[in-house]
Each structure stands twice: as C-alpha cells, then as structure tokens.
Amino acid sequence: MPTDLRRGGTYLTCEENWSDIFVKKAEMNPLEKRYGISGSDDSYRWNEVDKRFSVDATPNEPNRFGWVVEIDPYDPHSVPRKHTALGRIKHEGAAVTIAPDNRVVVYMGDDQKFEYIYKFVSEGKFNPQDRKANMHLLEKGTLYVAKFNDDGKGEWLPLVFGQNGLDASKGFENQGDLLIKTRLAADAVGATKMDRPEWIAVDPYHAGSVYCTLTNNSDRGKEGKAPVDAANPRAKNVYGHIIHWLEHNGDPTALQFAWDILVMGGRTDTDKPETKGSMKGAEFGSADGLSFDHRGVLWIQTDVSSSTINSKDYKGMGNNQMVATIPGTNEFRRFLTGPRGCEITGIAFTPDNRTLFINIQHPGEPSEGLSDPQHPTAVSSWPDGDKAGRPRSSTVVIVKADGGIIGT
C-alpha cells in the first residue's frame, strides 16, 4: 500500500500469506502453531529445494517474515527495509496518516480469522523539509492493538515489554522478542478477535475517522471458537462487515475511540438476520480492498473465494465487484464487476480523480483444485478474450470517455 507522506514518497508493502511456505515435520512449538507454519509439504514444496524453508533445518527463518517493508523507488541504491517495530503478523496493508503533532500513525490488519487490528505511533515527527530524517520514522515508536468494548467504545492497548504483564512470566524476553511474537502479545493483553481484518482506510476529510474491512469468518460462534460480540455480531459471518472508529478528539495518536459498524455484508433479498445485508443499493459480501478517493468517496472491492463465488451462500450474487459509498448515506453503488475466478484489488487514483488504477488478480481460477494446463481457458480467457489465450492478472486503467471525474 503506497504512501507519499514522506517528501519524495516511499512505498510500504506487506508480507501477508507467508507461513504456508514454511514446513516443519517435527512437533511444533506454540509460536509456530500460532502463526500457521505448515506441517506437510503438499502445497508449495519450496522446502524440498531450499532448506531455508524447512523449519526443521532452519528454525529461525520464519521469524524473518511477516513484516512491513519500506521501498524507496526514487533511490536506485536504496535497500528495502523491514520495519520490525510495526509487528510481525500477516500484514494485509499499512494505512498511514499524520497526527496533529506530526507523529506518523500506521494502521494495520492481520489477515486471518480471529486476528487483530493494530496501530503504530512513531516516536519522531514528520518534517516535510527533511526527507532523510523521515526515512527513520518507522523505526521507533509504540505498537498498539485494538480492544472493541460492547458499549461502542474502545481502547488501544500498548504492546510494550514490561507493561500489561508482557514480561518473562508470559514468555517474552525483551521488546524484540515480543515483536516477533506479536500475535501472542495481543492474545495476552486481551485484544478483540476480529472477523479477518484486511484493508484499512483513513478518511481524509474527517479527522480521526478510520474504516476497516472484516472480510468474513465462517467459524465465528462455532464450538471452541470465539463467540459473537458487539463488534463481530454475526455467527457464521460468511459475508463479513466493515467497521468504523473515531479516535478521541479526532487525534490518531489517542488511546481511546468510539466505534460503530458501517455496513453488514449480505443479501438484500432476505429477511434472515444471519444473511441479510444492511446496505441500500448494490449487495455484496467479503469486502476486502478499501480506499478513499480525493473527494471523500469510499471505494470497496470484494474478494469472494473462487470456491464460493456464485454458489453456496453467494449463489446469484455475481462475480467479485467494486462498489462506492459516501459514509453516512448507507447507499452503495456498483462501479464494476470482474471476470470469472478473479479477485479485484488495488485502488489508486490520480490527484485529479480522473484516472483510476485497479488490479484483476488470478482471473480464471477454478472453483476447486488447480488450473488445468491442458485447458487454460476453461474458466476465463480475460483479458485478451481469445479462445487460445490463457487468463492473466492485469492492471486496468480507467478513465471516463469525456475525461471527467471518476464516479460522477
């Protein structure tokens, strides 16, 4: 997820689904289990050709993954840097904003069922005239995890060694060790387990107003799993929802916030509370991508899995799509739909709002198993449309025929 908050601009990218690459055949320790290290090599099988992906051979190697990485595209001699102060999770993205006192705040979601929402507050302050100093702002600061209380209020709990019981008695040796074990630290302080937090968007026109897509969680409420709560109110939440919070006094560095639910995903043709969507207009589920344009319109992209799209609970709801809303109206309008088997992701507007970039990811993915190399166009032949052409992921550039503002 890009940010131009430093003078000249840098890019933050995130290590998300990395744990399945690693395989451990011996008994796993609690940390390896908590992060989902694979117990068999029947998926990627990288461990068969490079021992760094065999945890039995290199037990510390997984700890080098799960970080936010900063890239400087303007300096050909720069080296990408992993920012350990932002925690080690399955980072979906990093939404950056500047606080009134010029400290940098980064919001992050851990993309897995029952995981948490985090924010990082820098120790140093952003200076638009000092790019060199700004390059170090994500190296020191405080990492927090969110607790959503049932009364519509919430708090940010610091993940700091020596505070809130985060010490040797809980298995933490120092702050570095705690950051490697970020999930375990969040467990220990009692953060709220969310329905798979993914993208986070900061409202550019309402100070301290933040939104997060909770894509889905079919395990919510099952025996042995976390029950429903106010912030995750639906059992077997196959359609997901979008949560909103407002930082105290509109300050993103605040430790308290008020929260509400923007929308519950689901169908509009039913009265069943477990499947009914709360939106007016375009129905959708499994919201994933989330970003504001430069007018304050909130854009949402869906990621219904290929095994579910147009079937089961999603039968008749169409392919993955992109919708737009103005928060507070509860009206959602469909902007586009993708080809079969794809996820729609990536939202980037030019400053004048006249050009939009989006990505079509893995078009033609089958509903089960792997793609058949003998019949590559069985599901889709997008974007070429030629019967002989296999589907390909692509970036799409969208402009209006009259050159006007997107969404008008």
Image: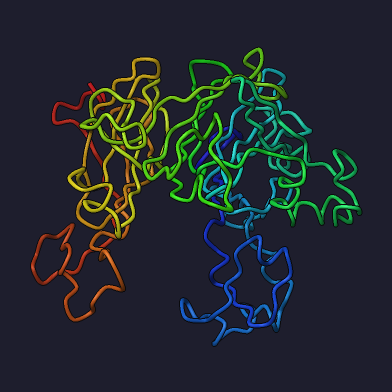
- Outermost residue to the front: 223
Q: Is residue 239 above or below residue 50?
A: above
Q: Identify the image quadrant of residue 255.
A: top right
Whether residue 216 sits left or right of residue 390 in the image: it is right
User: What percent of the width, then of the height, locates residue 395?
Assistant: 30, 51
Q: Residue at x 22, y 21 (%)?
A: 408
Q: How is the image coloured?
A: rainbow
232 or 242, which lies in front?
Answer: 232
Whether residue 25 sits left or right of residue 290 in the image: it is right
260 or 250, which lies in front?
Answer: 260
Total numbered badges shown on the rendered structure: 0
Q: Is residue 298 above or below residue 343?
A: above
Q: Is residue 47 above or below residue 356?
A: below
Q: Is residue 140 above or below residue 326?
A: below
User: What percent of the width, then of the height, locates residue 113?
Assistant: 52, 50
Whether residue 350 sits left or right of residue 45 in the image: it is left
Q: Residue at x 62, y 15 (%)?
A: 250
User: What percent of the width, then of the height, locates residue 199?
Assistant: 48, 40
143 or 164, which lies in front?
Answer: 164
266 or 86, which lies in front?
Answer: 266
User: What percent of the width, then of the height, locates residue 306?
Assistant: 29, 58
- Outermost residue to the left: 387
